[in-house]
Image (spheres, helix red, strand yellow):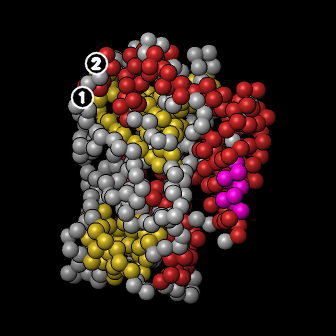
Amino acid sequence: MANSQALLSPFSFPQLPSPSRNHFQIHCTFGKFGNFLDLKPESKPQPLKLDLPLFHPYSDRSRFDVVVVGAGPAGLRLAEQLGGFGIKVCCVDPSPLSPWPNNYGVWVDEFEALGFQDCFHKTWPMASVYLSEQKVKYLDRPYAQVSRRKLKMKLMEECVTKGVKFHKAKVWEIKHQEFESSVSCNDGCEIKAHLVIDASGFASKFTEYSNSRPRNCGFQIAHGILAEVEHHPFDLNKMVLMDWRDTHLGNEPYLRQDNKKSPTFLYAMPFDSNLIFLEETSLVGRPALPYTEVKKRMAARLRHLGIKVKRILEEEKCVIPMGGALPEMPQAVVAAGGVAGMVNPASGYAVVGGMAAAPRVARVAAEGLGGGGRMIRGKALQGRVWEGVWPMEKRNVREFYCFGMESLVRLDLDGLRRFFDAFFDLEPYYWEGFLSSRLSLWELGMLGLSLYGHASLMSKVDILTNCPLPLLKMMANLTLQALR
């Protein structure tokens, strides 16, 4: 899960309650939907303890090769990768040692491939998908909850080792000249760099999108709690990737009717018999499902499952823009992570994509800054690095994922059940590769044909009814990209 930042947004987020410091505290009740809704989170995450090499504007040179805005997973990974090429980097963030607020769940093999297998908090050998009361699918693929503290500490230590400087401030404005940019901060400091990379989150105001082409995002929205419970019914050796059952709404006809049209599922990570992370999630909606609706459904589900929450240790809300148009390319500020559109448009997975792209982007930036023997600056450098962020093959693959998102957003509860019944019947190479964004465009095409072959008759009807318009849109976009 990815979290949205508190900067002004270039597009409209759904209107949702405002956060209170690190957690979203609930001050209202919902009558019979009570129980955990009246509880407040008890834990207060502590900042990391690390002696950071800070940028001192009055004693250090204020010119860097690269300024990275934001100290999230994508920003820190990119900063340390750039530092590994000997590039002079400054990472600007108001509170670089503060813990990240939201949980990250990943497939074990994905994080191992990135070299972060020592950053797991808990792993499960299998995952389960509940399609209905009668049908459950078990996925033989290990899943993990990332230790946010371990991951951030490892990235920070790598940054320190590779000479990255940090500046504790909020970026206020970025101005560009022909061969360098000036980053102005709210503390009055100005930092100059040959290249500025924006990794400050979905709501950044520094990355520009086309005024003539609407972003038209879908939104994944979720409410999650890390809770101490009296007991829960889940197997400790399996995390619950999706629970699409709706029997918990049997006595709530209005909620059940709405859930048929705009369904939510439960995502659960059981740590022991009394500690569990629970999250009610709308996979994708346009417009976003109201947040209060998600909480009401979660309360009804937990009550039906007999889960009585004793304490809430952590609470989180995720709003993730999915799909839609990419930023204008090239432009003076280079984007990375969520603001660059690196969320999987069909699943909402965010953290791995941004971190996996960092070595590629850093290598291209290092070559342009002189590591390859020929130094370039200004628009030539910015254009080169944007090509590293979104090479043509990656853009084409993203179009297929946007096609997938546009198809999913049209499905009701029964349609989604049928879809995932066929999807998880595919060869693991295909469904694993799809969820990990590692298939080529050709392989994605083969996945689509295989999916149709595995689909039930009603699922084939869903595909033929809902997919033609998104398919035509994808083909048009692929054609336009090929002609540019």
Q: Which mark is residue 106?
A: none
Location of mark 2 (residue):
31
Pick the quarter of the image with the N terminus.
top left
Q: Position of residue 368 (x, y in %)?
A: 53, 80
| Dot 2 alpha-carbon crowd within 10 angstroms: few under 14, some 14 to 19, many 20 or more | few
Residue in view at x 37 percent, y 63 percent: 205
Would you say the magenta stretch is mainly helix, strand or loop?
Answer: helix
At 66% across and 53% down in the image, what residue appears? 473
Tag 2 secondary structure = helix
Q: Is residue 475 magenta?
A: yes
Residue 354 visible in the displayed image: no
**In front of the other: 264 or 472:** 472
Magenta stretch: give its range. Answer: 471-479
Can you say whether 338 is above or below 405 in the image?
below
Rendered residue at 29%/22% (across/down): 30
The kind of residue on which mark 1 rests is Cys
Image-quadrant location for residue 313: top left
Relative height, residue 223 to residue 182 (above, below):
above
Q: Residue at x 40, y 59 (%)?
A: 10
Where is residue 285 drawn, in percent x and y?
50, 39
65 to the left or right of 366: left
57 w.r.t. 355: above or below:
below
Amino acid type for the residue under numbered disc 2: Gly
Q: Secondary structure at mark 1?
A: loop
The foreground one among 319 and 130 is 319
Residue named by callout 1: 28
